[in-house]
Structure formats: structure tokens, C-alpha cells
Amino acid sequence: MKSKLGRTKSLFSTVSFLILTMVLLFGMVYGIRYVCYKQDDTNMPIYKVDTDDKKISLSFDVAWGSNNIDDILEILDKHNAKATFFLVGSWVDDNKELVKKIHSKGHELGNHSNTHSNTTALSDEDIVEEIQITSDKISNLVGEEVSLYRPPFGEVDDKTIDICKSLGYQVIKWDIDS
């Protein structure tokens, strides 16, 4: 009887240890993830914003072509929806009236670089230039500064995020890609 009781206690201790280990591991993984997501001093782009509201954030990267912009704006108007348009500076050069139109309809404008270059392959100075030139182009057209930056190709590293933060930008990515 004593050995059966000893085995039961041993089994209970082992199972308890495994459960406690799993709970601690789960807590650490999700705790670290939560802390990194919630703190402003982390080098993480924003992929999503947790909310209890039933909302989505709709965004468009606008780097070339303008054929669909009016159709997109019409659909957004029809459904009383707003979106963020991340604009490439070279596109802004060729589509000044569309930039003004997007803004006048109440949509948010963001920066998507000047030449759609992968910032992870650029020098610090070139990254600043890619961002600043586009921001200047947009603000000169609409009279407002932009504060959102979406990296071309979704490629981003700590250097780019640090530079964006120093310039007052939030780096925005996506959690669902069309």
C-alpha cells in the first residue's frame, strides 16, 4: 500500500510539475509578446491595434499607376469608409491632383518612401532622404505633415525603425495582405 501511495504522489508531483512548467512557459511567451507589443520603446512596427470595437484599418500602398484611384475613392465614399494611402514620392510627383483629392475626401496620407527602395539596404542618410523628400512633397501639396511610414516590400530593420522614430514617424505594416 505504501509503494502504491508513493507512486501516486510521484505521478501527481510529475504531472503538477509539467502543468506548472507549461503555464509558466505560456505566460512567459505571451507576457513577453504583450510587453513588446504594448511598450513604445520597442523596435516593432505596428501590425495591428487590439481593440474590442468591430473595426478594421484599410490601407493602400500607392507606388505606380493611377487608373484605380478614382474607383477606390468612389467605393470608399459609397460605404462611408476611410483608409490610409501610403504614397511613394515619385508617384506624388506625377499625381499631384490625386493626392489632393485623396486628402480632401478625408483619407489619411502616409509615407511609402521616395523611390520605393528597400531601406534595409540603404545608409542612414539615404533612409532619411527617402522619407523626408516624400513627406515634404505630401505636406507641400496638402498642408499637413505625415507621421506614418510603411516600408517598401515590408522590409524593415532596427536601423530603419530607429531613424523613423527619430523623425517622428510610426512604422506601419499589415497583418492581412490582399
Image (cartoon, rainbow, N blue to C red):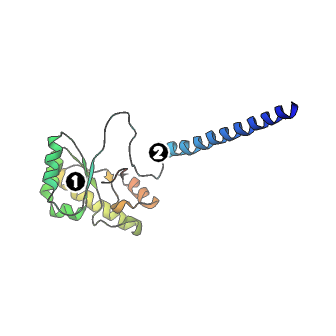
Task: Using the image as rendered, state which of residue 177 and residue 144 is in the foreground.
Answer: 177
Going 22% across and 65% down the picture, which residue do you hit?
A: 90
Residue drawn at point x = 24 percent, y = 62 percent: 63
Q: Is residue 153 left or right of residue 8?
A: left
Query: Is residue 104 visible in the rendered structure shown here?
Result: no
N-terminal of the pair, mark 2 or mark 1, is: 2
Residue 143 image position (x, y, % from top left): 19, 50
**Label 2 neighbourhood size at 10 Å, few (<14), some (14-19), many (20+)?**
some
Q: In which quarter of the image is the C terminus?
A: bottom left
Say if 56 sits above or below 133 in the image.
above
Residue for point 31% across, 42% down = 56
Q: Can residue 8 be seen in this view?
A: yes
Q: Is residue 86 above or below residue 118?
A: above
Q: Which of 24 and 141 is in front in this view?
A: 24
Instruction: Report x, y in % for residue 142.
Output: 18, 51
Hey, which quadrant is residue 150 in on the image?
bottom left
Q: How crowded is mark 1: few (under 14 residues within 10 Å), some or many (20 or more)?
A: few
In percent of width and height, residue 5 lies at 82, 31
Look at the numbered disc 2 and give the secondary structure of its residue.
helix
Quarter of the rendering containing residue 134: bottom left
The numbered disc on residue 37 is: 2
- Say what amino acid the circle numbered 1 marks: Ser
Report the label total: 2
In which quadrant of the rendered view does residue 18 lie? top right
Q: Which amino acid does label 2 sit on?
A: Tyr
Give the CA separation, mark 2 to mark 1.
30 Å
User: Residue 165: which disc?
Assistant: none
Residue under label 1? 139
